[in-house]
């Protein structure tokens, strides 16, 4: 057994994932995703830190995204076959603000209540004016370079037409809250203590993963078309909800990765998005095409093919900050984000 294998075997992170996902799934997660030593330092015991719980959630969410994106799953399988691992950089999700969201808190608040107790905090805010959205980057305070970030975007419904607003309300007003009162109490304890007893952490973890899903009822086909006319992003939310719209692999050279995948005939984005600083470069597979149900004019269930989630690639450079510290550039870029978001619109 190598030192890394021994570290995994004795870690609280491994114990938690085995408890929730089973031994085989946990082993597959550690094979697939590179986990830094700081995330394995906590030994298996009676308490689970917010850092370990956050990493466990992230690993399960990454695997969930792969199940939704065949191109991403194939890419990761090829990478593993070549002896590599994924460096999980960030996951992105979409929320709805200025609407009746039923039992679910509006916009980013639905996830702020989860991410902050886990140790994440807003690192920066990114206006996305072309999309009538705002993005917020949530970065982990305990291990910012080792734990994948969350890019949480809000769609501002009040900036659209009355017909659009009415359709949004019809769709999302049926939303349920995936968190029970007991779950919220555990999050409050986690926020206060920065840790939970193992049994409570194991109970809460699947509920946290379940937040990243569709919480509203099946939309009507008419409402979907109304939404699609003004916002491909809201049309996407109507079928995919708060699922990851993409998960992202941190690669050494995104240009080389894109060229290699394009040469293999993979459905990669034509352009690499480059941030204003030049230090952050991103591209992605085009969105998976998925079959989703709708309610037609006669009240019958019908199926249509729509854009689903996708898989992204990013390269981040290191830089020296004003205090002379060497850092990985963890920032995002509004222009990059709006270009990447087109992956779900282009397939409509």
Image (cartoon, rainbow, N blue to C red):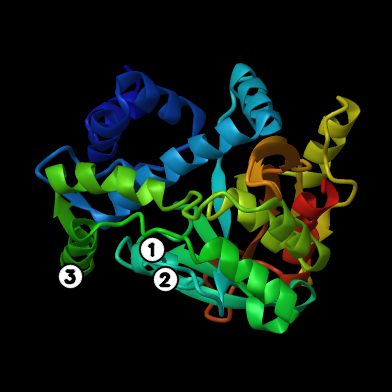
Question: Who is closer to the viewer here, 4 or 275?
Answer: 275
Image height of 23 relative to 100, above or below: above
Q: Quadrant of residue 137?
A: bottom right
Is mark 2 in CB contact (under 8 Å) with mark 3?
no
Question: Who is closer to the viewer here, 68 or 122?
Answer: 68
Image height of 147 relative to 279, above or below: above
Q: Is residue 330 visible?
A: no
Q: Quadrant of residue 130?
A: bottom right
Q: Which residue shows up at 65% across the image and 53% down it?
A: 220
Looking at this view, name the residue that lies furthest to the front: 298
Expressed as whole percent of the image width and height from the top left, the position of residue 97 reads: 55, 75
**Residue 22 in the figure: left or right of residue 235:** left
Expressed as whole percent of the image width and height from the top left, the position of residue 268 reads: 82, 39
Expressed as whole percent of the image width and height from the top left, the position of residue 26 reads: 36, 27
Question: Who is closer to the viewer here, 94 or 228?
Answer: 228
Q: Of the residues under marks 2 and 1, which one precedes in the sequence?
A: 2
Total marks in image: 3
Q: Is residue 310 visible?
A: yes
* Mark-to-mark CA distance, 2 and 3: 21 Å
Q: In terms of secondary structure, where does tag 1 sit? A: helix
**Which numbered marker is on residue 342?**
none
* Mark-to-mark CA distance, 2 and 1: 14 Å
Is mark 1 in CB contact (under 8 Å) with mark 3?
no
Question: Who is closer to the viewer here, 320 or 235?
Answer: 235
Q: Tell me the residue that label 1 is attached to.
A: 115
Q: Which residue shows up at 84% across the image and 45% down it?
A: 269
Q: Tell me the residue that label 3 is attached to.
A: 192
Q: Which tag is nearer the camera, tag 2 or tag 1?
A: 2
Expressed as whole percent of the image width and height from the top left, the position of residue 318 reads: 63, 60
Q: Of the residues under marks 2 and 3, which one precedes in the sequence?
A: 2
Q: Tell me the residue that label 2 is attached to.
A: 105
């Amino acid at each position: 057994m190598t030192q890394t294998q021994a570290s995994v075997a004795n870690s609280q992170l491994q114990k938690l994932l085995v408890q929730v996902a089973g031994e085989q799934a946990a082993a597959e997660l550690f094979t697939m995703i590179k986990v830094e030593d700081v995330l394995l330092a906590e030994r298996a015991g009676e308490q689970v830190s917010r850092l370990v719980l956050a990493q466990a959630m992230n690993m399960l969410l990454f695997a969930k995204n792969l199940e939704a994106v065949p191109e991403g799953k194939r890419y990761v399988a090829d990478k593993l076959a070549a002896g590599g691992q994924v460096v999980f950089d960030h996951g992105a999700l979409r929320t709805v603000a200025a609407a009746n969201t039923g039992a679910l808190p509006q916009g980013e608040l639905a996830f702020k209540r989860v991410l902050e107790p886990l140790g994440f905090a807003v690192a920066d805010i990114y206006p996305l004016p072309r999309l009538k959205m705002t993005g917020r980057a949530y970065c982990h305070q305990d291990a910012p370079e080792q734990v994948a970030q969350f890019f949480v975007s809000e769609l501002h419904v009040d900036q659209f037409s009355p017909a659009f607003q009415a359709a949004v309300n019809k769709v999302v007003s049926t939303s349920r809250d995936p968190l029970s009162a007991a779950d919220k109490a555990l999050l409050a304890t986690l926020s206060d203590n920065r840790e939970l007893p193992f049994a409570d952490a194991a109970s809460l973890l699947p509920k946290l993963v379940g937040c990243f899903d569709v919480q509203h009822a099946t939309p009507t086909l008419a409402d979907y078309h109304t939404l699609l006319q003004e916002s491909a992003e809201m049309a996407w939310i109507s079928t995919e909800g708060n699922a990851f719209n993409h998960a992202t692999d941190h690669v050494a050279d995104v240009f080389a990765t894109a060229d290699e995948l394009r040469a293999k005939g993979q459905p990669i984005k034509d352009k690499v998005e480059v941030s204003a600083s030049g230090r952050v470069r991103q591209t992605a597979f085009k969105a998976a095409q998925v079959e989703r149900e709708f309610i037609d004019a006669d009240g019958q269930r019908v199926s249509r093919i729509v854009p689903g989630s996708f898989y992204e690639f990013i390269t981040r450079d290191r830089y020296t900050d004003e205090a002379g510290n060497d850092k990985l550039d963890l920032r995002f870029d509004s222009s990059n984000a709006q270009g990447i978001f087109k992956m779900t619109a282009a397939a409509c």
